[in-house]
Amino acid sequence: MNRTALINQIKTKKSFLCVGLDTDTAKIPKHLQSNPDAVVEFNKAIIDATKDYCVAYKINTAFYEAMGLKGWQAMEATCNYIPQTHFKIADAKRGDIGNTSAQYAKTFFQTFAFDAVTVAPYMGEDSVKPFLEYDNKFTIVLGLTSNAGANDFQKLTVDTNNQQKKLYEVVLEKIAGWGNADNLMFVVGATQASDLKNIRTIIPDNFLLIPGVGTQGGSLEEVSKNGMNADCGLLVNTSRNIIYASGDENFAATAAKVAKDYNVEMSEYLKDVF
């Protein structure tokens, strides 16, 4: 899916919601746990219930890799079940020397049918470039994350060209030149909403993937107010708050209600954009 198609989906649905499929076998409803394909059946039910209210799904690969071969099969089945109208993100946080990154890119863009993959930039340009070589695919680079440990490195003050900047600012500025708004996005945590205005001065056009709204305490209103650009430019991800909204047999209907509530709120924030 390219940028234009993604923006059109946001306009059509009046939503920039991304549903995170961080499916934990211990947390899915008990009536499904005896099913040999419990993860896939759970994911299918969530997708069917929420697809009218969101524009993207994000699969956190760790929850699938932990199950071994069966988990990889469940991830593939889930990815293939997501409608083609929806943006598919592999939250894999890969990044290694060039030839290894090339294999990671092949995994998620060719072997699997993902539209985007999250990438850690610590090893530099040659670790990110292989992901950017695919047409109509997005590399989503970690920018300023929502976890407490973000302060350990990302907000350190560094001296660059005799200017004092935060390390995350240097990272954003540097990486923005490796790609463009058609193939490069950034992760910015919702709990960092106060930094979004500054981030938008550095990367005004790129889409931002925003985790941390809901269970982690991020504010959708603050994120929307400080992070939107002329194309919306946001994908706000919510995982546990939607997929585990209920643990009973009506879990899918409850997930749909929560997703719809987000959709309604997002449509209000989009009125000033479209």
Image: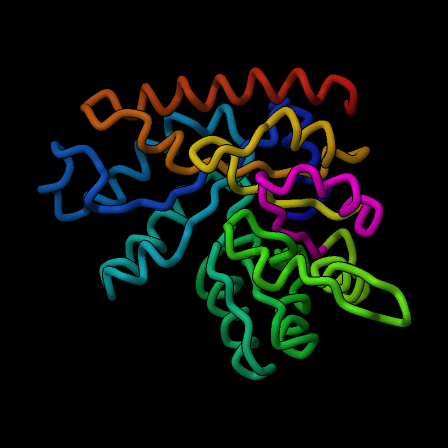
Would residue 84 be visible to someone looking at this image?
yes
| Farthest residue, direction right | 162
Residue 213: give x, y in percent of width and height: 52, 34
Image position of 228 with respect to 106: above or below? above
Residue 154 within the magenta-colored segment of the rendering: no
Please, is residue 267 above or below residue 148 in the view?
above
Q: Residue 101: where, in percent of width, then height?
A: 55, 76
Q: Residue at x 36, y 46 (%)?
A: 22
- Looking at the picture, how far across and down is residue 109, in whole percent? 53, 62
Q: Residue at x 40, y 48 (%)?
A: 80
Between 178 and 198, the one lying in front of the other is 198
Towards the viewer: 225 or 205:
225
Whether residue 137 is visible here, answered yes or no, is no
Relative horizontal placement of residue 50, taking residue 23 as reference (left or right): right
Q: Seen in the image, is 258 located left or right of residue 208?
A: left
Residue shown at the point (51%, 24%) measured from the top left = 53
Question: Does residue 112 appear left or right of residue 189 in this picture?
Answer: left
Residue extent of the magenta highlight: 183-204
- Quadrant of the frame with the C terminus: top right
Q: Looking at the image, how many numbered discs can be counted on the residues?
A: 0
> Residue 169, image x and y in percent?
76, 58
Color style of the picture: rainbow
Looking at the image, residue 74 lies above or below residue 122: above
Q: Quadrant of residue 180?
A: bottom right
